[in-house]
Image (cartoon, coloured by chain):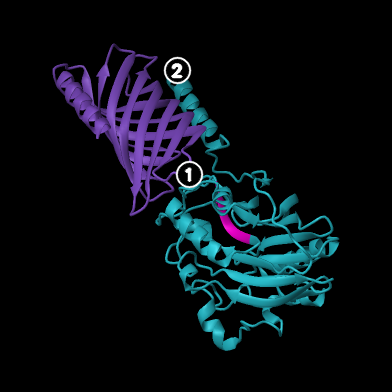
Chain colours: A cyan, B purple
Amino acid sequence: MEFTKDIFLHFLIIIFFSSCSDLSIFEKEKELISIYENSFAPRDFSIDDTLVVMSWNIQMGFRNDQNAFNGNDVGGTPSHFDQMVNAIKEINPDIIALQEVGHNADHTFVENQAQYLANALKMNFAYADYSEIITGYNILTRGARGHALLTKFTINETENIVSLQQGRYLRRSVLNTTIKLNDQNNLNILGLHFASRAEREEKINQSNHLIQIALEQRNPVILLGDYNDVHWSYVLTPFEENGFSNALLEESNPCQFNVEHYGSIGHEETAWMGVLIDHILFSKKTLNSYSLCLGDESTWTLSNHKPIIGKLLLKK
Amino acid sequence: MIIRKYFLLIIFYLSGYTLLNSQNSIRVSGLSTTKAYFADIGFSKTLNKNFEIGLGVLYGRHHSLNIKGGGLTTNVLLYPHENKIINFFIASDIQFTLFNFSSDQDNIDIKYLHLVGGYGFDLKLSPNFFLFNYFGLGATYEHRSFNQNNIKNRNHFDTAGLFKLGMKYKI
């Protein structure tokens, strides 16, 4: 009798152990966080000033020959982020949208990556989680990846809006940040990242949701991010139909990309075999774009995506 | 280096003491915590029919970072019943582990201190040979230190889990 009781107790403890929230093998949802910090004085801005904006999927600080999620590579080291900081200083952007930014992730050494980059670049920052981390088949890896927005201006408000609910590891959100350029002008930056493994229907829904969010904004809107798709795809064309322009397609663009360029500008690991899948979109009514370029070759090894840099002007 | 020296001293002392006492065991086990998994070689001393204490060295790999590390583990087992083929016990377990990553510019240490309490069993396979297993839950403290000046050392408290499976041989 006592022996049966012991076995029963043993199994009860196993069940308790496996259902404990931190060790649970069952699906759990973590609350998405969104933070911002204005630690630095904003730069002056006048309506004639060019806004240099940049979008970069940094793959949590892993190099382009590494994989952040296979559980075998070691990355996210301070020296790697220092190289990124040096590269970004050369570009000198006013606004940077980063995707796949690690936050308290077990498998990277720098844990609050947005804050680390912002402090090194002396920029204000916002950060928002969108999905949790899994490395290889290790369900015990803790941490999140998300959007970061770094800016030389003051951040007034941030909002983290879920745009694709596809389990905790593939969930996507939009980081909507309101930036104060000066007393008269504000700007909304939408940082986004489409899930590469989402179904067509889910991607279309995500596009429509993003368009709706962008249209609701009273300020000029710039949509920066990793769309995981090409400019002529069903993901991006609805934006153009709703009053948003892709900087890639602007005729005045001095670094005009064409089909011949595509073979060399993307990254090899995407399904698109080297085409451009990171884009800068903006509201046609309120903004003009006159340049879109990639970061120089020194940035190409720092992530499996290349940084994309646009120059925009507010319409008077 | 200092830690390694003390490990060796403790193991040397304990192994000598153990071999002189017939109430002791040598154990080999594998254990997995929420942060890493390890191979564990150690000794146990049976204080009386209810209590057993153990000490072991650990060597293993971090779950999430592809780096190797090692450490020291100590545990206390409480057997609430008489000796049978299967003996259930209550366990408390402490582990200190250290991981290091070095490259040209980075030198990063990650230290963990796990404290867990758990429940498990011994299965007697022969008069001297046992299979044992236990689960534990508790707390972990993590300390990350960097050689760079522009990043602060980080401390974390977190919940911890432990699963241990191994063999024990009574000397």
Residue shown at 71%/74% (left/top)? A236
Q: Is residue A149 magenta?
A: no
Residue lying farthest to the top in this orientation: B48
Check the image and report above or below for B137 versus A55: above
Check disc 1 and report the residue beneath it: B151
Identity, as a three-letter code, of the amino acid under mark 1: Ile
Mark 1 chain: B
Image coordinates for residue A314, horizontal then vertical, percent: 78, 69
Query: Does residue A26 appear to the left or right of B83 in the view shown?
Result: right
Provide the major secondary structure of the magenta segment: strand
Q: Residues within 10 Å of mark 1 (few under 14, many from 20)?
A: few
Task: Name the residue located 68 percent from the left edge and 72 percent from the top edge.
Answer: A311
Are the residues under marks 1 and 2 on the same chain?
no
Which residue occupies the foreground of this view, A291 or B63?
Answer: A291
Looking at the figure, which quarter contains the N terminus of chain B?
top left
Q: Chain of mark 2?
A: A
Q: For the magenta stretch, what is the residue range?
A: A97-103
B84 lies left or right of A78 = left
Q: Residue at x 31, y 38 (%)?
A: B70
Query: What amino acid type should be assigned to the residue bearing mark 2?
Result: Glu
Which residue is labeled 2 in the image?
A2
Q: Is residue A101 magenta?
A: yes
Q: At which x and y percent is residue B168?
A: 26, 29
Residue A294 image position (x, y, % from top left):
57, 74
Within 10 Å of the Cα at label 2, are there few (<14), some (14-19), or many (20+) other Cα atoms? few
The extreme bottom residue here reads A260
Q: Position of residue A237 (x, y in %)?
A: 74, 77
Residue A156 visible in the current orientation: yes
